[in-house]
Amino acid sequence: MAYVSRDDPEGADKLRHLFSPEHADQQIRQAIQFCWMALPEDRRSVDEVEKQIRRLVDRALRDLREDADAFGLGGGS
């Protein structure tokens, strides 16, 4: 397990390298598998998984924008 001190001025950059695009890709693929398994057997299809994954991602991004605006973090709109 990697450790990055919050006092390290390069900490954010170190974390950025730790959580690379490959890490995000792996997490997305795992979410797709979980979605497949969670669907009732009679609704399991690639089209249905795509529909549900897009719905969840759209909701998560909408919430991220709302939270950024609410907390004054910028980048929301």
Image: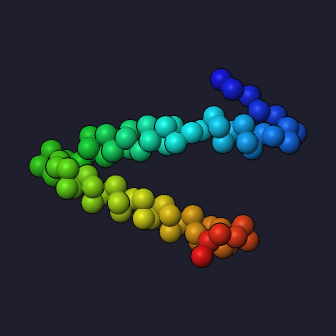
Seen as rendered, the residue at the extreme top is 1
Q: Nearer the viewer, residue 12 or 58?
A: 12
- 44 on left or right of 30: left
**Residue 29, image x, y percentages:** 37, 41
**At 39% from the left edge and 59% from the top edge, which residue is drawn?**
56
Res 12 quadrant in image: top right
**Residue 14, image x, y percentages:** 72, 37
Quarter of the picture containing the N terminus is: top right
- 66 on left or right of 56: right
**At 42% from the left edge and 59% from the top edge, which residue is drawn?**
57
Quarter of the picture containing the C terminus is: bottom right
Residue 40 vertical position relative to residue 67 in the rendered view, above or below: above
Residue 19 vertical position relative to residue 54 in the rendered view, above or below: above
**Residue 35, image x, y percentages:** 31, 46
- 24 on left or right of 40: right
Seen as rendered, the residue at the extreme left is 42
Residue 26 vertical position relative to residue 74 in the rendered view, above or below: above
Q: Is residue 47 visible?
A: yes
Q: Is residue 71 visible?
A: no
